Image (cartoon, helix red, strand yellow):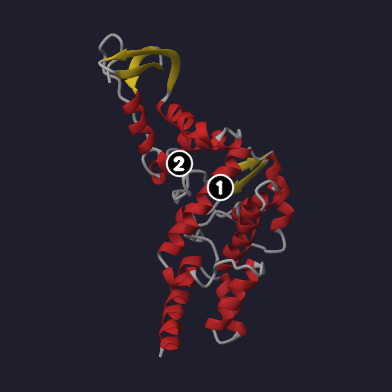
Amino acid sequence: MKATGNTPIKLTAPESWNELTLPQLRALCRIIASGTDPAYRQQLIFMRWTGIRALPVSRLADGIRFYLYLKGRTPFWMSVDTYRVFLQRIAFSMQRSELSNQLLPCVRSLHRKLHGPGKKLFNITYGEFIHAEAAYNRYLSHPADISHLNALCAVLYRPGNGIPVHSIRFKGDRREAFNDFGYMHRAAWFNRVPLWQRIAIFLFYTGSREALYAAHDALRENTTVGDDHRSDIEKHRELVNTLNQGDVTKTEAVYQANLWSVFGTLNSLAVQNKKLMKK
């Protein structure tokens, strides 16, 4: 594209979730938080990500409609077809999140610094995951109830454990150990965290769990929420108990183990069980 003074104008925007930068994620989440009509949301996202502004001026040249935009202080013309191509490239932003890069490693609630999990939830426990799943699914069922979003954030983001990252005691997680009795108390803290950050946490969790299930296909059908509306935590417990033949000592160890390691083991067992059932 050319500016009105024939200076080339280069517009760039991410084309997938994991190409997002923190400023781009912030802009996206603020637009979502504002409640903008979905019909206009994609266009607004495009303008925020590219840094352009639309002007109420158009012209017709060779049967093609062009509109005037500003990039910084530089005006330029863009055709309707070119505009549509750009919108198609960022169409992912209107679809289910696949964001698994951790762009928000910590948040603040007043004076408290709360640390989050790593990329693709690599450093959370299985017990932490099933509580996160319960809050996540409650929020999907009741999106107007922000307390469920706060609960999800409280599961994933916690105060630091005080271990310096350069210490030999540091095991890749800056958060204090997960306590399933304490996280609901912290949920109220997230009322002091900007809404866009909570939405960013939701998008990150959504994308990370998709990456997790994509790597362990046999488990997805075993943990799908059904019409009986039983607790998601209870469904995961039933899965673990079944695959461990009811051995309580093994079950408790599973809750404290790394999520991805547990999913790898359970996925293998689920595949074996499925083969046995077919015989």
Q: Secondary structure at mark 1?
A: helix
The picture quadrant where one finds residue 127 is: bottom right
Q: Residue at x 45, y 64 (%)?
A: 213
Task: Locate residue 51, reporting x and y percent.
Answer: 42, 24
Residue 148 visible to the viewer = yes
Q: Quadrant of the N terminus?
A: top left
Nearer to us in this view, 49 or 143: 143
Residue named by callout 2: 93
Residue position marked by numbered label 1 in the rendering: 201
Neighbourhood count class around disc 1 (C-alpha, 10 Å): few under 14, some 14–19, many 20 upward: many
Separation of marks 1 and 2 at Cα, in angstroms: 15 Å
Q: Amino acid at mark 1?
A: Ile
* Residue positioned most to the bottom: 279
- What residue occupies the far top of the structure in this picture? 5
The three-letter amino acid code for the residue at tag 2 is: Ser
Measured as percent of width and height from the top left, residue 267 is found at 44, 74
